[in-house]
Amino acid sequence: MQSAVPAPFPLCLGTFDPFIPMRVPVLTYHSNNIHGNDYANNNHVALAEDLRIIHRKGRRIIPLTKVVDVLLGDAPSTDVQNAVALSFDDGSWFDWYDIDHPTCGPQRGFAGILRDFTAETGASVHATSFVIVSLHAREILDTTCLVGRGWWTDEWWTQAEHEGLIAIENHSWDHNHATLPVTAQRDGIKGTFRVIDTYADADTQIRHASDWLNTRLTPHHTTTLFAYPYGESNDYLVRDYLPNFIHEHHLHAAFGVEATPVVSNSPRWRLPRYVCGQHWKSPGELERILDS
Ligand SMILES: [Zn+2]
């Protein structure tokens, strides 16, 4: 005779045990943010120090794709236990090369900072760079946002993918950036991503950008992650375009900016990230994020 008393827990809801809590801070840095040589005004200084804080606290640094794999049930939650993930935004040369900054002097590129950390500690490290895909847009942004020395080209993206240290993912076609004369937005409204709210604009800004990366970075690359420019999304993208057109854009998840860790029920199409200089401005503030 079978017992009428139900089991206290469902035995299995998927391939992997879903009951280990997931709590992964995703830390975001902008390599163009160099306004001095202190932690609070230079993301390179902050990244170098933060890596050591993360290591000192016994946290592992894992690829951002692994966080999404666990979120979607495609990898065991043990893969993200005690972990942190890193992402970079916009994809300029400062992510990759050491550059002599015109006012702040020599700057170690983010890639060099990651390699230095591994050489010093032996710990593995990985980051995801969300890049602005349009070459034409980057050529203009190189002048309007940097100093017009050709520091926003993309030849290093292939090298990064080949080395496996920094993954390249999608930060839109042109960022709908305010300083561009024309962007892929039907009404010419720029400087915000909230106005990308039709199929045609989303298709260009997101699907077209992913396709370009997949073609350019072939044969080893498949774009699966998107980060909203300015961290700004809208209901059309989060509830309609991204979930309903997966067969076209082939993304697995999208990231915004919200000061919480990724947990097991975080929204797949608007996952949170902490932003350096916005959500923490000192080593102590980062420690509080990691300890919370
Ligand atoms: Zn951006």
Image (cartoon, rainbow, N blue to C red):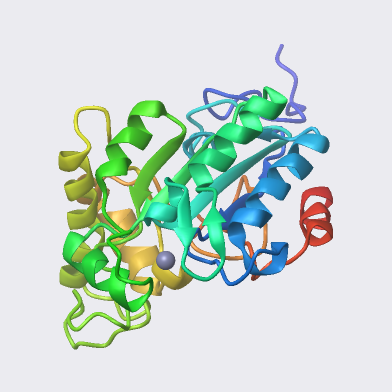
Whether residue 30 is visible to the viewer of this picture, yes or no, is: yes
| Image coordinates for residue 178, horizontal then vertical, percent | 32, 83
User: Which quadrant of the structure image shows residue 194?
Assistant: bottom left
Identity of the residue drawn at 67% across and 56% down: 46
* Count of numbered circles in the view: 0
Q: Is residue 21 above or below residue 107?
A: above
In the rendered image, which quarter contains the N terminus?
top right
Q: Is residue 223 above or below residue 89?
A: above
| Image coordinates for residue 36, horizontal then vertical, percent | 62, 69
Q: Is residue 190 above or below residue 82?
A: below
Pick the front one: 241 or 215: 215
User: Which quadrant of the structure image shows residue 62?
Assistant: top right
Q: Is residue 24 above or below residue 106?
A: above
Identity of the residue drawn at 69% across and 42% down: 51
Whether residue 274 is visible to the viewer of this picture, yes or no, is: no
Pick the front one: 234 or 124: 124
Locate residue 76 relative to residue 56 in the image: left or right. Answer: left
| Image coordinates for residue 137, horizontal then vertical, percent | 22, 68
| Image coordinates for residue 252, horizontal then vertical, percent | 38, 44
Pick the front one: 108 or 52: 108
Locate residue 99 relative to residue 200 in the image: left or right. Answer: right
Identity of the residue drawn at 27% across and 34% down: 221
Locate residue 233 relative to residue 274 in the image: left or right. Answer: left
